Each structure stands twice: as structure tokens, then as C-alpha cells.
Amino acid sequence: MTLFAGIDSGSWNTKAAVIDADGRVLATAVVRSGADLEGAAERAYKAALAKGGLTQRDVAAVWSTGFGRNSVPFAHGSRTELDCHGRGVAFYVPGPLVVIDIGGQDAKVIRLDASGLRLSHRMNRKCAAGTGSFLDEIALRLGVEMQDLDRLAQTSTDELELSSFCTVFAGTELLSLIRSGKRPADLAKAAYRSLVKRITAMDVLQGKIIATGGVVAYHPTVVTLLSQACRTEVAVSPHPQEIGAFGAALAARDAGSTPEVERDESTSPRELKVRDVP
Amino acid sequence: MGETEKNGNGATGAASSRADFASMGALRETMAAYFESLRSAAEDHTAPVAWCSSVGPAELLRALGFAVYFPENHAAMLGASRTANRYLPLAHAQGYSPDTCSYLASDIGAWLAGETPLTAFGLSAPPRPDVLVFNTNQCRDVRDWFAWYGRTLDVPLMGITSPRSIDEVTDIEIDGVTRQLEALVPRLEAVAGTRLDASRLSAALSASHDGSTLWSACLATAAARPAPLTFFDGTIQMGPAVVLRGLPEAAAYYRILLAELQQRVDQGIGAVPGESLRLYWDGMPIWGRLRALATTFAEFRTSVVASTYCNSWIFTLDPDDPFGSMARASLELFIVRSEEAKERYLEQMVERYDVDGMIFHDCRTCATNSNTRYGMPRRLTERLGLPTLVLDGDMNDLRCYSDDQSRTNIEGFVEQLTDARAANRRGTRA
């Protein structure tokens, strides 16, 4: 059985996925990235292998993606997370479609055509609003753990608006609202609403929309609000947090059979040569 | 495929590492001579000094015998030397918003700090102006910028208040600016201590016309495959086109450069070895990241073959109609035009340079030169089927630029274009 692996080296979490030649996910793992991205990549990879009862010898190729894609020394190639999230989702969902990825530090909107080719992408503009970092700040201000934020929001009864454009401002605005007697549950929901507003301002969101990333994996209220804002049901991809790693594993699988991508054996194994098709 | 690549003409060029331009020596000498003339004017009092906005009435000033200094050139040097961020806070403390022109703020900040990269050219400071001359055709900020110096140094400030966002340039706009230019003459004569000589003005206009015609020809060589120079090369090579307007030295240098570029075209030598993708850059340079961006694009075998910015110092000037042609030239520039006119221009450039995509630089502190803000990238993509990418940054304030995010954006864009090309060739595109 020929296996392939993908490592998504994110600024918050490093994800690993191991797949077979048919694209079936055999194992995944998520570890905190911390300051040692190389170490995190290794830990995530080993954790995924262990979960699947596999060894490195079983894996024919590993590709990387994410913010730290060039910090995975054992990767044979890399593609951006823009590619891998789209590639991963397109494996499960036929296009045309829009992929919304909400991560710890960035948010992306990726548009694919009917064949799964990327048409465009948008990334958030140097600002944590609209990302997991924003929710981290909100949870801190509300005095709850991140994993409890969604449960809290689901008990909301009053529709509030957080007017701030900025994570820091939103934090201080929250304090004002708390002082004025607003309920934490309503504030939590307002924070999710604010995050969704930032996402819907990034691009025109219509048609088939699939959400990925750790935020949608652990905060289903975001998906509900996205669906309301987009006026269509937003689905969550399989393996939403690991979809980037899955996409990288698919890229590893496809690298051997795709004529337009060649690996230059004289260079570092993780250097991707993008060559013109003859 | 090995290490050789065919170019569009069928000639084979070695995909060697990038070779520097042989003309760089001549460029350095040309620019050094310019800065020496400024030093001499300011310190030896060989000529009165005029500060001029970059597309202001430089020919008129040269004809009156002024040594002409361009503060925007100084600001670009601050950006390229990555020292601008040292000076920005000094201007911000004076009340200039961090959201407005980082050229203005870094230049004023450097003045307040008493520091300048001009020391490399023998000047201890920017040459003290005798007059400050602006044209708001490019933006209002140049007037605010010069006004600071006017107040601080008690120096006369004068210039052109220009129409902007013009669709078609008509006699209405031309006549208005012509009258303003003519009205400047007696005021400038009073500072210069001499009368305007028609033959000197004619000579200045001819020199500018020749220089910008040759500069335009240099840029046009990038239509070849592979392109012999990139936008990043252009930001360095454009020096004479900007600061030597009205003088024959600009044309003299660009004859040398053009010959070298044509030789590169004939030999199939590209600025980016193995050129695979071609892009167009709209908007300001990110001065402090020129080398890094040039390296990144080259790594992806992507040549940024043309730009709006480098093509902005091309003037059609008529010595037989000096004031009318100066007025017209100042109004026809891209930066002065409407969204519709700009889109028509960009469409022509896309076709002329046969690009695969366009990059728009959204420059934080230069709204005037950020054509991302009213939906243009999306309209171009929809109308032309041309992929576009918006990069966030700034011309001088590197706090507004993310190396990592930009690299991901660029790399992702290259992936998108390469995959689309491969799919088109396989016939698998949806």
C-alpha cells in the first residue's frame, strides 16, 4: 500500500494527514506549533503515523503547506495553503465552489472552478479580526475558555452588535458592554457575528460554499451565522482543521503523475520547481 | 528540459543566473553628476535651487537656470535604503497622520533628524531651496509636503492646482493649466533673477521629449520574450527620467541602456532566467523590498515585465507649443485620469506586454496611486479574463508590509496561473 502525507505548518497549530493512493484518510494529528516549527512538524507527523499504526517507511512522499511550509525539512515539496485547502475540499466536493478558511491568524476565501482549479483568492488584510486570534481575545475578555465560547454563544437571547473594526478595540468595547449589563452569552454571539462580517467583506460569497479551518471545526455558531449572511447553507468540509494537510498529501500523491510539476533532484528535496509545460 | 529555454522567437538562451547591466557604471556616473550639480548649486551658489514635484514643471525651472531637486527622489532613497521607518515617527509627532503619504513623512522626518542618504553623493543635506514648486496633478500631498518646508524655511511656495480624475483631456483642462503655468513665470523669474528665454525653454522641452522617448523605448523592449528587464530593474533605471528632465544627459544615458537592452533581446537574454510567467505591476514600488521581491519572482521564474509606475515619466512635449504641451503632458498622465481611462490604459498594456496576470499594490499611504480601492482589479478580471492579485504594502513604511503574507500571496498566484496554463494545454479546464 503506497501512502502519502501532508504537513500543514500553521502559525498556531501544525496538522498532519496520512492518506492512501485513493485519497482515503488513514490518520491525522494536530499539535501546537509553538516557536519550533520544525519540531512541531515532526511531532505532528509522528503522531499521525502512530495513530494509524504506520511507519515513515510506509510513506512514499510528504509535502508541506501553511505559513511554515518551508520549515518542514523532511518534506519533498510544498504548495501554499491556498492550493491545499482548495485541493482538499475539491476532492470531496465538486466545483464550482467557494472555500472559506478561517484559521488562527488568517482567513482566506478561495474560489474554484468546476474542475477544481483555483480562480482567485483573498486573504485577510494584516489584521486578526476575522480569525481565531480575535476569538481568543474575546474569550479572554469574557473570562471563558476558548472551547466553551461556542456553548456560551448558543444560549444567547439578545442580538447585539460589536461595532469595532479591530480586535483590540473590540476587547475594550466588550468591557464597556459588560459594564452596561450585557450578558456574556450575547456578547459571545456578537463576537461571532463580527467575525463573520469581516469574512463576508472579503469577497462575493455565493454558490456552493464550504468552510474549513480550526475555527469552524470548534465554533459551529460561525457556520450558522455564515449561512445566514450568505443566504445559503454553508457546509463544513470533512476534516476541517486538517484539510490543508490532506490537500498537501494529495499534492504529494499527484506530484508523481502531474506532468507540469517536476522535482529537480539536484536541489533540496523540499524545493518546488514550477516549470512551464512543454 | 535541462537548463535551456526557448524564447518566443525560437532563439535559445541559456537560463543562466541574472547578469547585471553593463550600463550601470554609466548610470552611476550620470546620477553622481546630477547630485554634484545640486551640491554645487547649494553650497557653491552656482545656481538657484528649486524643489519640484516629480511630474511638476521641471522644464520651466531648468529653462530659468534652476538646479532642480526632487524630494520624492530623496524619499524613494529613504525607502530603498530601508531607513524611512527611522524617520516616520518624527513627522507623525508633528501631527502628520501615519495614514498619509509616507514619502512626505519620512522626508520631513529625515530633515528633522538632520540625516540624509545624499551624503553618499557628497551632499551634507538636501540642497536648501530658493523656491518650492508643485503640481497637484499627481496628488494633493505634494503641496502639503512642500508647504511644511515653505513654513519652516520661509521659502516661497507656488505651483499648479490641477484638475484630477480626468476621462478625456480636453482644451478646457489644458487651457486652465496653461494659464497657471504662464502665471508662474514672473514669480519664478523673480526668484531666479533672470528672464525666461524662449530658446532655453525650447531646448529643455526637446531634451525632456528625447529623454522620455528613449526611456519609453527602453521599457518597450520588455515586450520581448524573455523580457530583458523587469519592473524592479526599471525602478533603478528610471532615475535619469525623473531627475534629469529638461537636460540632455537623460537621453545620453538611455541611448546606452537601449543599446544594451536591444542586444539582450537579440541574444534572448532575459532578466529572469527561464522566464515562464509574465506579470504587470500597477501602483507604487515597495522600495524597501525591491530586491526581496525581485528574488521571489525570479525564484518562481516569473518576470514582472512592465508597470504603470515606470511608464509614468513619458512626456510628449512640443517646443513650438511649450506651455500648451507642458499642460497637456501634465494632464495626460495615468495618475491624473479617471478609473475608465486607467482601465483603457491597463488593457493596452496587458496586450502590449502579453502578461499572464496583474499585480495591484495597495499602498497604505498613497491612495492616489492605489487602483484597488474602487473595484478595478475585479472589473479587469471580469472584463479581460485576466487574473489579478492585490498585495498590501506601502512605498516607504515597511510596517504596512508583511513578508510572509506577501510571499504566500505571490506563490499562490503563481500556482494559480501555472495550474491554469497546464489545464488549458491538457484541455481539462472547466
Image: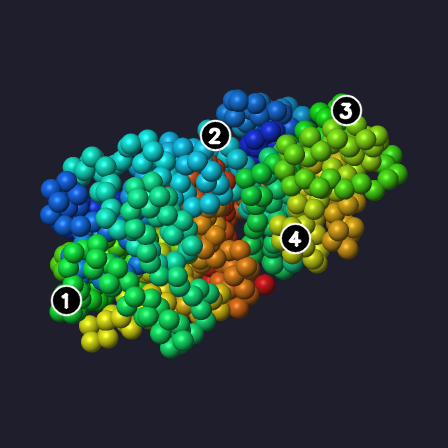
Quarter assignment of residue B105? top left
- Distance, label 3 to label 1, CA atoms, is 78 Å
- Distance, label 1 to label 4, CA atoms, is 65 Å
Quarter assignment of residue B83? top left
Q: Residues within 10 Å of mark 1 (few under 14, many from 20)?
A: few
Q: Which mark is residue A71?
A: 2
Amino acid carrying mark 2 in the image: Ser
- Distance, label 2 to label 1, CA atoms, is 66 Å
Return the residue at label 1: B197
Task: Tell me, yes or no, if residue B400 can be seen here.
Answer: no
- Distance, label 2 to label 3, CA atoms, is 33 Å
Task: Tell if the residue under mark 2 belongs to the same chain as the one under mark 3.
Answer: yes
Secondary structure of the residue carrying tag 3 is loop
Where residue A243 appears, as percent x and y from the top left, is 64, 40
- In the picture shown, does residue A107 fall above or below A135? below
Task: Tell me, yes or no, if residue B109 can be seen here.
Answer: yes
- Distance, label 4 to label 3, CA atoms, is 32 Å
Tell me the residue at 47%/38% (across/down): B95
Amino acid carrying mark 3 in the image: Val
Give the colouring mode of the picture.
rainbow
Return the residue at label 3: A144
- Residues at circles 3 and 1 in contact by the CB criterion of under 8 Å: no
Where residue B159 appears, as percent x and y from the top left, is 33, 58
Q: Earlier in the sequence, mark 2 or mark 4?
A: 2
Image quarter (top left, top right, bottom left or bottom right) of the C terminus of chain B: bottom right
Instruction: Chain letter for mark 2, please.
Output: A
Task: Tell if the residue under mark 3 belongs to the same chain as the one under mark 1.
Answer: no
Instruction: Chain letter for mark 1, please.
Output: B
Task: Tell if the residue under mark 2 belongs to the same chain as the one under mark 4.
Answer: yes
Return the residue at label 4: A98
